[in-house]
Image (cartoon, helix red, strand yellow):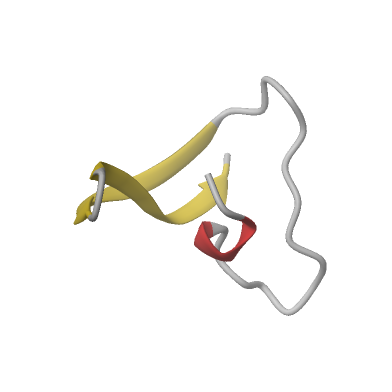
């Protein structure tokens, strides 16, 4: 997942390994991809 898929809350975009998230799936050039990724 590219960091640009992480929802921007005005701060630094990052996720920890194993962190639970919610996202929407959309079609990409190489198959489904995650968009609007938000930590839970």
Vertical comparison of 21 with 5: above or below: above
Is 19 on the left or on the right of 1, as rendered? right
Report the quarter where the C terminus lies: top right
| Nearest to the observer: residue 27 or residue 35 | 27
**Residue 1's spot in the image, x, y percent?**
52, 44
| Nearest to the observer: residue 19 or residue 35 | 35
Give the quadrant of residue 29. Answer: bottom left
Give the quadrant of residue 11. Answer: bottom right
Q: Residue at x 54, y 51 (%)?
A: 38
Is 28 on the left or on the right of 9, as rendered? left
Is 17 on the left or on the right of 24, as rendered? right
**Residue 4's spot in the image, x, y percent?**
57, 65
| Nearest to the observer: residue 2 or residue 25 | 2
Q: Residue at x 73, y 79 (%)?
A: 10
Residue lying farthest bottom? Answer: 10
**Residue 5's spot in the image, x, y percent?**
50, 59
**Residue 28's spot in the image, x, y percent?**
24, 54
| Nearest to the observer: residue 33 or residue 13 | 33
């Amino acid at each position: 997942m590219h960091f640009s898929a992480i929802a921007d809350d005005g701060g630094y975009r990052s996720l920890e390994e194993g962190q639970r998230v919610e996202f929407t799936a959309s079609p990409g050039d190489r198959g489904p991809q995650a968009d609007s990724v938000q930590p839970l």
